[in-house]
Structure formats: structure tokens, C-alpha cells
Image (spheres, rainbow, N blue to C red):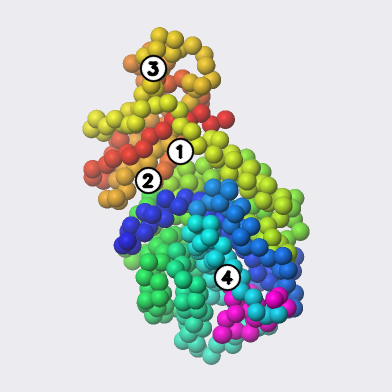
Amino acid sequence: MNSFEKKIDFLNWEFGVFFHFGIRSFFPGHRDWDGKEMPLEGFNPTGLDCESWVATAKAGGATYAILTCKHHDGFALWPTKYSAYSVAGTPWKDGKGDVVREFVDACRKAGLKVGLYYSPAQWGKYAIDFQNAREYDDYFINQISELLTNYGKIDYLWFDGCGSEGHEFDKARIVSEIDRLQPAILTFCDPEWSPGVRWVGNEDGYASLHNPLVVNKTDFSELAKEEQNLSSAMFLPAECDCKIRNTWFYDLNEDTLKSAEELFGMYEMSVGHGSNFLLNIGPDNRGLLPEADTKRFLELGEKIRAAYGSPLDYTPPVQNGDSYVISHREADDPDWAMPEEGRLSNTLVLSEDLSGGQKITSFSVYAYLPLYKNKKIQVFEGKTLGHKLICKFSPMRASKYEVVVNAADGAHKITDMKAFYVK
């Protein structure tokens, strides 16, 4: 699978779960860069059960999961040889535990794609005093090499650039080593390192309705003041990372848990706008997912399935030039116009063939009326289409739906076109 194919495949993953877990999970109230020490003896997740995390993720509809192997505080969830600040120095399992191993094994057992997060930044008592830039890069490469050597195939490597804006990494050297160790891996990072997946530019879980896959500038981190210009336009799918509470790590803030309705809206405006949805849940200091968070996540999964699990009875799309039409299979029934909830629809989900790149740049959606079956009205208008686009409008009994492509960068094809009634 080449680089372009890997990125197309990534869009098919659609929904992932972020697990922010580490020493911060044992020190409620701490924040990034607050300077407060978090001693190693505080880390002791006696009930750690990564299989239950992953089982919840899968039950809610996720296809991939990501673990924070090392966050900005520098604490490593595996027994790294390159820092004293790791699970090896904690009372958990007498220093012989490895959270990364348990997480990777759980993902493979459940059939989820494996993602590992790594932040090159660090602070605090155990931060290494690097004398020069090369030492910093050596440390970075050494730890990443452990993660990419000791745990089998890793599908996704997620770099957090936050906090390392002042360091000029040897990008070519780092990327070369990653590619050598895991040639098939996909990366989330600065596109100038390795063009893979880009940050959507916010941590709220939303992508713009107009969401081009080819971009010439991107957001780098939440601390950066402006978008960075790329050396050339690149095909970069976006990922919308967000959290189920108002903190990434577990804290005493269950009252900030988002409603299933809000989370569903985030799904519709991430996956439904052609990006991936990456929702964070912070395992608690037992090493388990909080009960309230688990319940809410499963509610979200059920809400997604109820809304988009069963399309209405329309035919597959028929293309005629720039026009694509689906027809209700009962539209010729003389009783079609009778009020019946099962015939209402208010949502059209579209997918574009991306094998040759994103082509459609402007389109209109029309609905054909129930009585005046040859009369159509416009219900939606958009620019980019891409992997998936959820088009929403008021409920109606449409005998047919038509998508007209108004402009495109070459030959186009809409591969999927389904109608739903989303309550």
C-alpha cells in the first residue's frame, strides 16, 4: 500500500478513541506546563484492564485506538531504557509492568487498528538536560525506536507538536528511521516531516463543511500563532481530536461530561464532513474507564447506529453525466403521497470515489416532490464532497434525490448515495 492508498484507507477508519492515560491520571487538578511535580510512586493502576477499554471502544463503533505512550510530562508507559521517569520506577507490578504492551495486545485481540501517541516535549524534575539539538533528537529517536521495534506492527503514530515549537528537529533523520522500522505506518505530524494525517485545527471535534483533502497550509499546534505554509500542496486527510470531558486526562470533573446529543453532533460534523473523529476518554486511577464515561460513549455508539445503520429504501445511484439520481422503490405507488413516517427523509449521505483524488468542487442536491414527482427543489448546496458528506435538510417525502455536480477538477464519480430519516 503506497502513501496515497494509506491515507484513503485511513478515511475508511472514520471513528477512533484516544486514551489519555499516564502519571497525570493519578494527580487530579494538574495541567500541562503547570510545573507541579508528579512523583513516580503515585502511579499504581492496580485494576488496569486495557481489554475493557478496547472492548468499550469497539462496542461504541470505533475502529482504531490510540494510547498516550509519553505525554508532555515525560512519563513513559513502557520500561524505556532512556529515561528514569517510566513505569519501571513505579510500584505498579513492582516496576515490571508495561501498559503499552497490554494496550497493543488488547487492540489486536479485538481487531482494532493500533495507534501510539508520543510527545517529544517534556518538563519537570525528571526532564533530561540536553546539551544540544542532536542529543534531543537522539533521545526522541531512541524512544520511538523502542515503540516501533518491541510491539509488532503499529498502524498509526501520532506526534504532538505542542511544546516543542522552539526545537528544530532533524526531520529527515527521524522520518528515515521511522520508515525503516515500520514501512507501512501512517503518521499524524507536521506534514513537512512526513505527509500523512493533518490536524483539523481545533480540539472541539468539528471540521468545516468545505473540507478539501489537498491543502497548501495547515495548523501545527494549539500554541502556534498562525497556520504554516507548506512547501507544496499536499493530499492530507484531517482528523478531529476532541474529548468527552473538558480535560484529556482523568480528573474529578464528571459534571463536564458531554451529552450524547453533543457528541453525536461532533460525529456528524467530523466524519460527516469527510474527516475522522477521534474522541478521548481518560481512564481513571484504577486503570479502568469511568462508568459514566463508558455509559455515555455507548449511548453515542447506539445513537450513530440508530441514525445511520439502516438507509431508507432507495435505489443505488444512477449517473447521467454530471447528474446522480436515487429513486424510492415505492415512488410509483399511487398511495405514495399518503402521510407515513417511514417515507420521511431529511438526510443524504454521499461518498466520492477518491482513487484518483478529490475531484468535486461544487454540487447541488435536489429533492423531487411526492405529488409533483417531476418537480424538484434544491435542499442543499456544497463544495467539496470527499470520503463522506452528511447533507441535512428538513423532513420530507421525496420520491427521488438528485445530486448535480456543478464543477470538478476532472472526471468524477459519486460511489454511494443513501437517504436517511435522522430524528
Q: Main secondary structure of the magenta part?
A: loop
Q: Which SS class for mark 4?
A: helix
Separation of marks 1 and 2 at Cα, in angstroms: 11 Å
Q: Is residue 205 left or right of residue 229?
A: right
73 drawn magenta: yes
Separation of marks 1 and 3 at Cα, in angstroms: 23 Å
Q: Which of the two discs, 2 and 3, labels the residue nearer the N terminus?
A: 3
Amino acid type of disc 1?
A: Ile
Q: Nearer the viewer, mark 1 or mark 3?
A: 3
Q: Which of the two discs, 4 and 3, labels the residue nearer the N terminus?
A: 4
Q: Which mark is residue 390?
A: 1
Name which quarter of the figure residue 335 lies in. top left
Image point 54% across, 20% down: which residue? 341
Q: Is residue 136 left or right of residue 323?
A: right
Separation of marks 4 and 2 at Cα, in angstroms: 34 Å
* Residue at the front extreme of this rendering: 109
Q: Which mark is residue 349?
A: none
Q: Which mark is residue 100?
A: 4
**Boundaries of the magenta span:** 69-93
Q: Which SS class for mark 2?
A: loop
Amino acid type of disc 4?
A: Val
